[in-house]
Amino acid sequence: MPVVIRSSPLRIHLDRNRFLDFPELEVHAGEMLLIQGTSGAGKSTWMHALAGMIPLSSGQIEIPGHGTLRAGQSVPKSWRRHAVSVLPQRAFFWNSLSLGENLSLAAWAKGLDSADVDLDRLGLSEQAAQSAHSLSMGEQQRVSALRAFLSSSPVLLADEPTASLDDANATNMMKLLRAQQAKQDCGIILASHDQRVLPYADRLILLP
């Protein structure tokens, strides 16, 4: 399977005197890589660095077909729209917009014509005109996951996607991620301390 993201060893400075080092990385299409570690090990920091959201002190990250991010340089223009999608720990929606409008806004931000999100799949098509915050936490997080897949990016970064979910909703979330991944053949990097996600991962990296 083709490589969707690779990086050299990375160093991220937290402040003048503190830094975190991360190992080299390579993820293939269709692969789910799980990153685990104790609180403060840097799981979220590594994810943010891979997304181009925080600067690199040293090292480089390549997403084939979308350029290379090198320490001291700006993020390649195509990354935010087409190369990397991010699924945050807590779903975010605009309170003033309906669920359908939130999805349309996300599509516009990705340069798409419309929000191609299959709400029928979640049994939520009738709630499209309601506030997103009328949904349960599990429903919100699954809609957030579908939104992250909108642009068919080769890389999806999921930060603690099951952290606030009960067992049933955590299972639904992981099944949804795997099903969407199979449709789009992307690579998923998932940072989580949740042991319930282990059976779904192809590979594990433990941060000290």
Image (cartoon, grey):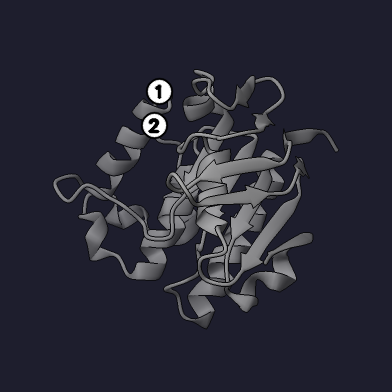
Quadrant of the rendered image containing residue 108:
top left
Residue visible at 59% across and 33% down in the picture: 153
First in sequence, mark 2 or 1: give its number.
2
Between 129 and 93, the one nearer to me in the picture: 93
All told, the count of numbered labels is: 2
Point out residue 141 in the picture as x, y percentages from the top left corner.
42, 60
Secondary structure under badge 1? loop
Q: Is residue 162 left or right of residue 92?
A: right
Q: Amino acid at mark 2?
A: Ala
C-beta proximity under 8 Å, tags 2 and 1: yes
Secondary structure under badge 2? helix
Residue visible at 58% across and 27% down in the picture: 71
Residue placed under numbered mark 1 in the picture: 113
Residue placed under numbered mark 2 in the picture: 107
Residue visible at 65% across and 54% down in the picture: 179
Q: Is residue 66 left or right of residue 118?
A: right
